[in-house]
Image (cartoon, rainbow, N blue to C red):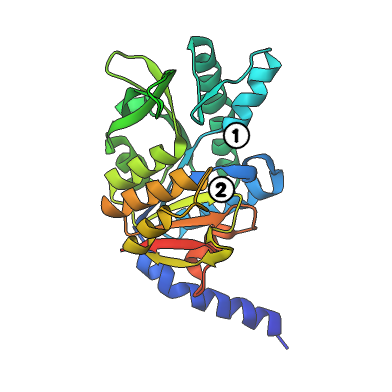
Amino acid sequence: MFKEEIKKANTLLEALPYIKKFSHKTLVIKYGGSLMVDDALKKRFAEDVVLLKYIGINPIIVHGGGKEISKWMNKVGKEAVFIDGLRFTDQETMELTEMVLSGKINNEVVSLLNQAGGKAVGLSGKDANLFLAKQIKSKTNKDLGFVGDIENVDIALLNTLSSNGYIPVISSVGRNKEGETLNMNADHCAEAIASAIKASKLIYLTDVRGVKVDGEFIGRMALEKAKDVMKHPDIKGGMLPKLACSIKAIEQGVDQVHIIDGNIEHTILLEIFTDVGIGSMIQT
């Protein structure tokens, strides 16, 4: 009798130490991957984030949207051009990018969170001078157009919103000193915000379980181990910037970084509030 109910109660008790540990702490979550196109997973993600807020944790969401940008470029008959793995962004592409990131995707995430019972607010790096960025070139010194990287983060607005019960949702668009709008890598933006705010956790949602080398999944890594793993040829593609950003975040004072599979229902809760966790975690 009551076996299922008791099981649920034990699950809550398992989570209790973690809830106590992270209450009133800030978590920066990079929202991305296939999660962004699966309606059921998007709904579960929103529910998880709102739950975090209700139990006293302050989540901040950062997102990009490369696949959606490419889709809309195709719709208007514009071909995407990549240089050394980065999207060349001319003025027309920048306008389209801002429309997709700060308009369509940001509004959708905010709406999902509010439907789930949260109080979400959509932002870009241009709001309240959140990001100050600089224009960059490719690794081979080629022009990328309006592509940038963050030089400075002003966390005042984020602190104000979080302390007043709001969930900030930030698109990876910023501006430079000249006032020009720049497109930025969302992984880098998430790291920069987490580092500036000294977040307790930085969480990257991806399409893979976590870090894997020589066919072996790595569940936990100290900082020095992560630096060694970074040199492995298996660390490539989208994992390369995520692991590089993870290392930088830890060096800048973030307590823990998680790289987890966003395609698993309630993946954030499973990683944070269970004894084993389901992804890769990097810490000092």
The residue carrying mark 1 is 108
Res. 109 in view: yes
Q: Secondary structure at mark 1?
A: helix
Q: How crowded is the residue under tag 1: few (<14 C-alpha within 10 Å), some, or many (20+)?
A: some
Can you say which quadrant of the picture contains the N terminus? Answer: bottom right
The residue carrying mark 2 is 117
Query: Which residue sits at x=32%, y=59%?
Result: 255
Res. 130 in view: no
Above or below, 100 against 27 in this view is above
Q: Position of residue 121 (x, y in %)?
A: 46, 35
Kind of residue at badge 2: Gly
Q: Position of residue 187 (x, y in %)?
A: 44, 41
Q: Position of residue 188 (x, y in %)?
A: 40, 39
Q: State the separation of the CA atoms marked 2 and 1.
A: 15 Å
Q: How crowded is the residue under tag 2: few (<14 C-alpha within 10 Å), some, or many (20+)?
A: few
Can you say which quadrant of the picture contains the C terminus? Answer: bottom left
Query: Which one is nearer the viewer's eye here, 140 or 131?
Result: 140
Q: Secondary structure at mark 2?
A: loop
In the rendered structure, the answer to whether residue 101 lies left or right of residue 130 reads right
Query: Which residue sits at x=44%, y=62%?
Result: 281
Q: Does label 2 or label 1 sit earlier along the sequence?
A: 1
In the rendered structure, the answer to whether residue 29 lies left or right of residue 270 reads left
Instruction: Give the quarter of the image for residue 19.
Output: bottom left
Instruction: Give the quarter of the image for residue 129.
Output: top left
Q: Position of residue 128 (x, y in %)?
A: 32, 26
CB atoms of marks 2 and 1 within 8 Å: no
